[in-house]
Amino acid sequence: MRKLLTVSALVLVILAGVSFTRKPVQSFEKKEKLSDYGFFLGPLADLTPREDVIPYHLVTPLFSNYAEKSRFIVVPRGEKAEYNGEGVFNLPTGTVLIKNFYYPNDFRDPAKGRRIIETRILVHETDGWKAYPYIWNDEQTDAFYDVTGDTKSINYIDHRGKKVQTSYVIPNKNQCKGCHSTGEVLLPIGIAARHLNTNFPYKQGPQNQLSHWMEKDILDKLPSGMIPRNSKWDDEKDGSLDDRARAYLDINCGHCHNPKGAANTSGLYLDIHTIQPNLYGVMKTPVAAGRGSGNFQFDIVPGKPDQSILYYRMNTNDPGIAMPEIGREQIHQEGLALIREWIKKMNP
């Protein structure tokens, strides 16, 4: 009996020790300057991450007015993201997603430098995901918390050598909900297997991102096979025309146009999981007529992109008609060409 009591006491001591040593989740403290977080080492504009700030990219990224993006994830030490084959991973409280929007001075030559415009931080707090927007100064020395948004004049040379001067609208904090709301809840978009299942050029060499996250011990329950992956929208060798068009619509439109998204009342579901043609627009009548429909009858008319509302709304900058509504001051000509070809080759 004495031995049993001794063992029991030891167990209690161990359990008590565990409860005292377990590190509680620290609440996120918003900083006024991006540099105050310490996510990056050296000059801030170099975006050189500290060891636990993991870079990543998406197979097919969301178009944002031709801006490039530099993405990072920070998972709290000792915690892991939980794999989900269907949607966004279950990310632990304290996870931070960092997305920097920038323009190369010359898209043909990255060595000529870049201008970072804004940094958006998404934080998983105890009461849900919160957005913290930062705007970079002209000196490119730091970015400052700003909830009101702004409009910047942008100059760059595009891939064809053409000089481009345009405006870039930085959304205000409330507009984050326009893309990130799912069932009234703010959620990340890109942290899903189908968007992440690709190689990333790490310093040590290229490696599949999901495998890298497992090695870094920040991902759990990754299956050994059958991991979904969207096609790369602009790589003709990476899937059929249908695969690439659906991948483009999935990342650019599917976050709103899905059964739980902000645009679910439209009945137009452009996420990759919707497989019934009439639900992703084929010969589907819109719920509302007017300017947005261009007086056309159907969202997609097989073989006839010029009579399809989907193509019509992608092919304009009119703020009362253009889709997506946020983050597109320029028409994405290459994406538009893909969707045109996709509709054109549909069987009537």
Image (tube, helix red, strand yellow):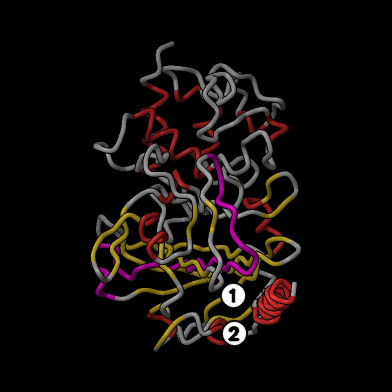
The spot of residue 151 in percent (x, y) is 58, 68
Residue holding disc 1: 134
Are the two marked residues, 1 and 2, in contact with CB atoms closer than 8 angstroms? yes
Magenta segment: does it hold 170?
no
Whole-angstrom CA distance, mark 1 to mark 2, is: 8 Å
Q: How many marks?
A: 2
Q: Is residue 175 visible?
A: yes
Apparent side of residue 29 relative to residue 77 in the rendered image (left or right): right
Residue in the image at 55% along x and 43% along y: 87
Label 2: how many Cα within 10 Å (few below 14, some 14–19, many 20+):
some
Depth order, front residue of 124/175: 124
Amino acid type assigned to the residue bearing label 1 in the image: Tyr
Residue identifier under label 2: 33
Write the residue at 51% across / 44% down.
252
Towards the viewer: 300 or 16:
16
Considering every residue shown, the one lying at the far top of the view is 348
Question: Quick check: 316 above or below 41?
Answer: above
* The N terminus, quarter of image: bottom right
Q: Which segment did they paint magenta?
A: 86-112
Place of residue 32 in the rendered image (x, y in percent of width and height, measured from the top left): 64, 84
Residue located 66% across and 24% down the image: 286
Q: Residues within 10 Å of mark 1 (few under 14, many from 20)?
A: many
Q: Position of residue 120 (x, y in %)?
A: 57, 68
The C terminus appears in which quarter of the rendering?
top left
Residue 250 lies, in percent from the top left, at 50, 39
Closer to the camera in the image, 44 or 211: 211
